[in-house]
Image: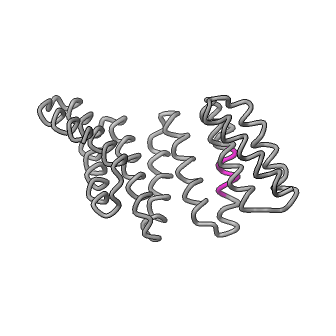
Amino acid sequence: DWEKSIALNTKATIYLMTGNYSKSLEYQLAALEIAERRGDEHEITVSQNIIGSIYRMQGDYHKAVEYHFLALQMAKKTENIGETINSLANIGSVFYFQADYDETIRYYNEALELCQELGQLATVMALHINIGNVFLAKKNYEEALRHYFLAVELNKQVDNKSYLADCYNNIGLVYIETKNYDKALEYHFNSLE
């Protein structure tokens, strides 16, 4: 059963990466069924989070939140901090796609708090970028910049060029929105380095 579950997860991931969400969902639901039969709480949590993400990508936000909350409950029950963080961030993302920015920030901040306690700097950085994006969407440019610059500072310890490029690009977007075009150009050029 364990080998079959791994194979199903692999197939689900391949279909997910190629944009075939219905096939991905089919295989992930089958993997979840095996995990439930085996009583593998970790795999149940992982599968529920992936299923939630598939539903989010399909635009079925109700189902997405349902599965992410199931994953969150299981992660908390089993004291799996990594999956708790993942579930909280996923729930925040679903609310983001629904433009429910206050709920998004609530869940991102909960995940951020746990990451900071554990010293997971790369995830802290990613969450600051996400929170900055929420404030950008809310047109709260000062808060957006605050989070982006926090992420830039963290990058000195993390050294993730992809995240840093995202930060600089997003900072540039804030400056475009605030009509500070010289600064926008400066940060957009920085994102290319």
- In percent of the image, x 25 and y 46: which residue is there? 145
Residue 153 position within the rendered picture, expressed as x and y whole percent measured from the top left: 26, 58
Q: Is residue 6 above or below residue 20?
A: below
Colour style of the rendered protein structure: one colour
Residue 185 position within the rendered picture, expressed as x and y whole percent measured from the top left: 17, 32
- In percent of the image, x 83 and y 62: which residue is there? 39
Residue 175 position within the rendered picture, expressed as x and y whole percent measured from the top left: 20, 35
Q: Nearer the viewer, residue 90 or 192?
A: 192
Q: Is residue 167 above or below residue 189?
A: below
Q: Is residue 34 above or below residue 52?
A: below
Q: Is residue 18 above or below residue 166?
A: above
- In percent of the image, x 82 and y 58: which residue is there? 2
Q: Quadrant of residue 94?
A: top right
On-image quarter of the N terminus: bottom right
On-image quarter of the C terminus: top left
Residue 166 position within the rendered picture, expressed as x and y whole percent measured from the top left: 34, 42
Q: How many marks?
A: 0
- In percent of the image, x 65 and y 69: which residue is there? 79
Looking at the image, residue 99 sits to the left or right of residue 75; the answer is left
Question: Please, what is the dominant secondary structure of the magenta stretch?
Answer: helix
Within the magenta stretch, is there residue 57?
Answer: no
Residues in magenta, as a range: 66-72
Looking at the image, residue 7 sits to the left or right of residue 50; the answer is right
